[in-house]
Amino acid sequence: MVSEVRTSPVAGQDYPRTWSQFLDWFGSEEACLCYLERLRWPHGFACPSCGVTDEPNRASRGRLICRACRHQSTVTAGTVFDKTRTPLKVWLAAVWYVTNQKQGVSALGLQRVLGLGSYQTAWAMLHRLRRAMVRPGRDRLKGRVEVDETYLQLSDRERPKSKRRGKSNATKTLVAVAVEVLEPKGFGRIRLQRIRAASEPNVVPFVCAAVEPSAHVHTDGSAAYRYLPDEGYQHTATVMLRARKPAHVTMPGVHRVASLLKRWLLGTHHGAVQPGQLDYYLDEFVFRFNRRTSRSRGLLFYRLLQQAVATGPVTYQHLAGRR
Ligand SMILES: [Zn+2]
């Protein structure tokens, strides 16, 4: 397949403009396979085994056979959709729904809207998509960056209340927050990470992973951050205890992001997120926040699918934290 590579995808050509166009494009499994093939190999098929780029031989059930080494693969093998029993039409509809809902969707909501037979299927689909929400090699935050920690109150039960057995336990989890602060006003991108404690061995690696050295990092007066200049950062600490201004005035970015995050977890997910799964919810929140100004929801559909075919498979056992 010879395909043009455009720098910015175009609505109506690279991704559907509307739901009715979506239905037109993705009426069959073959159409979905073709679309994913174009996303996965924009320069044409590359054999996952020997790396040769050449039009493969096509066999039944979407199998692609490399002409050089005879290796058999499919467009979904080695991606988030590997070995799925859910039709690709349903997967694509899920991605459309997840990216078109500004606040995202819970597993129960997805199960209902797609008419899925089981809650587990909806839950596992959402979690597989969350694995694809972090773009490998993404740039670190730059410029002026606020960094702080916030506590989240989580319930250990993710299932709907009617299906719960026994009591749920609420736990407090600490999350590190980094926010780009723009001039003259407004916020840029964010990063979030669950951390064990608000101590130096936890917060400094977070800053190093999330923020470009040479950025200007603004924190509170916590001693955990005092050696940031040794890592190449410019550092301003505001001591809250004696400050005349409350925290939401001195650290408006962190304050705003933390309150939106809490509202999202309570609203879309009813505060019911297992602490062991929190990292993936944080990834979803960051994905949404960093693309909040995107003009087209269809573009988010395109980007998430593009990342999904570039992300490796995850088993259900792994998703559920059982090995
Ligand atoms: Zn090959």
Image (cartoon, grey):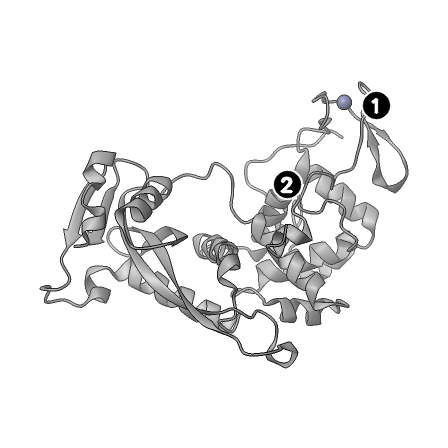
Seen in the picture, residue 14 relative to 284 is either above or below; the reply is above
Local secondary structure at mark 1: loop
Which residue corresponds to mark 2? 312
Mark 1 or mark 2: whose residue is earlier in sequence: 1
Label 1 within 8 A of ligand 1 by Cβ = yes
Local secondary structure at mark 2: loop
User: Residue 230, percent across and down?
Assistant: 20, 35
Q: Nearer the viewer, residue 200 or 27?
A: 200
Q: Residues within 10 Å of mark 2 (few under 14, many from 20)?
A: some
Seen in the picture, residue 57 relative to 16 is either above or below; the reply is above
User: Residue 143, percent across and down?
Assistant: 27, 43
Which residue corresponds to mark 1? 70
Cα gap from disc 1 to disc 2, whole angstroms: 22 Å
Q: Which amino acid is tagged 1?
A: Arg
In the image: residue 259, left or right of residue 60? left
User: Residue 280, percent across and down?
Assistant: 52, 54
Q: Which amino acid is tagged 2?
A: Gly
In the image: residue 39, left or right of residue 213? right
